[in-house]
Image (cartoon, coloured by chain):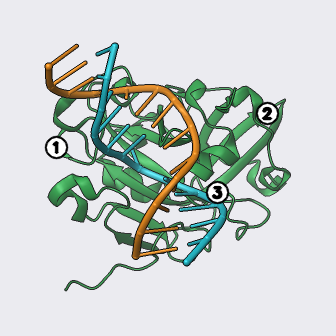
Chain colours: A green, B cyan, C orange
DNA sequence: CACATGATCGCCT
DNA sequence: GGCGATCATGTGG
């Protein structure tokens, strides 16, 4: 097989969690039921934690994008589209939506809003616990590859799954920048909506690190 | 059934 | 800045 499976994942030791992150606390469900752009902003600094053979690995999220469901031409659920692929986006906030793109990459999203409302936050980049500059988690597909996120984890509950969870950050409020989203040229006027958020102080952000001046 | 395309990345110029 | 890899998915016939 040429396509990677979560069960084949060989974690990088640089993602092994350090003792200072062992005390990270969980999110409440209600965190994910608020407006998606708020959740996207507040997920900067949160930790995505993965278990492999009883060892914990993880990374600190530094870049996200909000996708606003049926009114957002960039969202897979635009216009109320509901197909088997998008189904996980319709779950209650706090679940994971994983999709496959370009024949070789996975992307991971955190579902927001109540069940039946298909909005989500794309995880675009994260920092490794040891070396924040390593770049192995910079970009949505590399983030998935480094953490072994594949379709097998699609639909996971990030508050309860044994395999993958999301935990609150413990390092204070980061300085946040806001720009339009990346890679959605087909989305008409929605492509200019300011829905990409990143940690201004992180070296692991994937795309442009400043907003182009208008005109 | 056939076909067009993408929420990307890495390598090339 | 450009382009090829590579295939699941959605759409249309």
Determine which residue is flagged by label 2. Answer: A52
Local secondary structure at mark 2? strand
Mark 2 or 3, nearer chain start = 2
Alpha-carbon span between mark 2 and mark 3 = 17 Å
Drawn side of residue A29 relative to residue A67, left or right: right
Residue C1: x %, y % from top left: 40, 76
Q: CA–CA distance between discs 1 and 3?
A: 30 Å
Give the labeled residue for mark 3. Answer: A137
Give the quarter of the figure containing the N terminus of chain A. Answer: top right
Q: Nearer the viewer, residue C1 or A27?
A: C1
Q: Quadrant of residue A116?
A: top left
Residue A192 falls left or right of residue A137: left
Location of mark 1 (residue):
A71
Residue A6 visible in the current orientation: yes
> Between A78 and A19, which is closer to the camera in this rendering?
A78
The numbered disc on residue A7 is none
- Residue drawn at the location 24% of the way across and 53% of the way down: A186
- The earlier-in-sequence mark between 1 and 3 is 1
Pointer 2 chain = A
Q: Mark 3, residues whose alpha carbon is within 10 Å: few (<14), some, or many (≥20)?
A: many
Give the image quarter of residue A115: top left
Pick the residue in front: A28 or A190: A190
């Amino acid at each position: 097989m040429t396509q990677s499976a979560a069960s084949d994942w060989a974690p990088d030791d640089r993602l092994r969690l350090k003792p200072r992150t062992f005390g990270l606390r969980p999110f409440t469900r209600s965190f994910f039921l608020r407006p998606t752009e708020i959740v996207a902003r507040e997920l900067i600094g949160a930790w995505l934690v993965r278990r492999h053979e009883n060892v914990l690995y993880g990374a600190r999220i530094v870049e996200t994008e909000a996708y606003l469901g049926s009114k957002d031409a960039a969202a897979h659920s635009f216009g109320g589209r509901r197909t088997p692929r998008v189904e996980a986006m319709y779950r209650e906030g706090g679940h994971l939506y994983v999709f496959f793109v370009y024949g070789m990459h996975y992307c991971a999203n955190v579902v927001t809003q109540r069940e039946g409302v298909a909005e989500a936050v794309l995880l675009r980049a994260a920092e490794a616990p040891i070396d924040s500059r390593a770049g192995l988690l910079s970009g949505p597909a590399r983030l998935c590859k480094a953490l072994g996120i594949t379709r097998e984890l699609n639909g996971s509950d990030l508050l309860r799954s044994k395999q993958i969870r999301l935990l609150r950050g413990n390092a204070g409020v980061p300085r946040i920048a806001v720009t339009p989203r990346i890679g959605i040229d087909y989305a008409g006027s929605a492509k200019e909506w300011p829905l990409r958020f990143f940690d201004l102080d992180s070296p692991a952000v994937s795309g442009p690190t400043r907003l182009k001046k208008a005109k």
